[in-house]
Image (cartoon, rainbow, N blue to C red):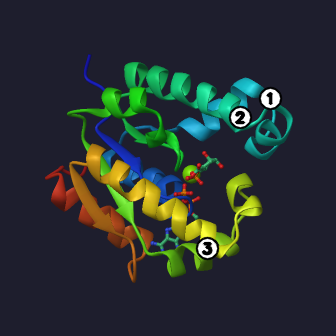
Amino acid sequence: MTGPVVILVGPMGVGKTTVGELLAERLGVGCRDTDHDIVEAAGKPISEIFLDDGEPHFRALELEAVRTALAEHTGVLALGGGAVLAPETRQLLAGAPVVFLDMDVAEAVKRVGLDAPRPLLMMNPRKQWRELMDARRPLYTEVARAVVSTENRTPDEVVGEILDVLELKQK
Ligand SMILES: Nc1ncnc2c1ncn2[C@@H]1O[C@H](COP(=O)(O)OP(=O)(O)O)[C@@H](O)[C@H]1O
Ligand SMILES: O=C(O)C1=C[C@@H](OP(=O)(O)O)[C@@H](O)[C@H](O)C1
Ligand SMILES: [Mg+2]
């Protein structure tokens, strides 16, 4: 069992999906995103899963999606921002090439404000965003082999930094 070549974790809007796709292209491998797998299996968007079934149900689906992707996928894997909340997921990630994509709260608000609605942010004003980051930062750090800042960097520059820190060769 080889597992993914890179696994991206970090807060909502940090660029896991965007950077994951670019990175996979540069490495000549496939990109998988657990949020996409969950949406496909559930047949509805994440916002509807949260509304219809609640966050605990989403987290259960997410744990299974991460477990399956880690077992099946050998390319780049992007996780959802809250995947590391599950202790089982953090255990599954132990020893894997995990990169924590980082940014501060102001940058998070700026970026996600430009993007499609994410359920947790619809419910969470700015103060809760800060609490969310404070609570999760230790979890991202715990699972990460490397931390890469995404501030004042284009997605392409972030990809370059990931290749450097993990000493990966481009195709
Ligand atoms: N390095 C970056 N600088 C500025 N904006 C970015 C960067 N990376 C991603 N974005 C933008 O931020 C938003 C969220 O990106 P996304 O890849 O969906 O993040 P995630 O999967 O981590 O939630 C998108 O609008 C994307 O274009
Ligand atoms: O941080 C979170 O708890 C979440 C992040 C989202 O993924 P992205 O980090 O890719 O936006 C998605 O899984 C869901 O909306 C919950
Ligand atoms: Mg994403």
SS at badge 2: helix
The label number, if any, that marks residue 127 in the structure image: 3
Q: Amino acid at mark 1?
A: Gly
Q: Amino acid at mark 2?
A: Val
Distance from Cα at disc 2 to Cα at disc 1: 6 Å
Q: Please report contact status of discs 2 and 1: CB closer than 8 Å, yes or no.
A: yes
**In this rendering, which labeled residue sits more in front, label 3 or label 1?**
3
- Looking at the picture, does residue 109 appear above or below residue 165? below
Q: Earlier in the sequence, mark 3 or mark 2?
A: 2
Q: Residues within 10 Å of mark 3 (few under 14, many from 20)?
A: few
The yes-or-no answer for disc 1 within 8 Å of ligand 2 is no
- Is disc 3's CB within 8 Å of ligand 2? no
User: What secondary structure is marked by label 1?
Assistant: loop
Q: What residue lies at 35% left-to-right and 34% top-to-bottom?
A: 90
Q: Which mark is residue 43?
A: 1
Which mark is first along the chain, 1 or 3? 1
Q: Callout 1: few (<14), some (14-19), or many (20+) C-alpha neighbours within 10 Å?
A: few
Instruction: Note whether 17 is above or below 73 in the view shown.
Output: below
Residue named by callout 2: 39
Does the CB distance between marks 3 and 2 fall below 8 Å?
no
- Residue 72: x %, y % from top left: 42, 20
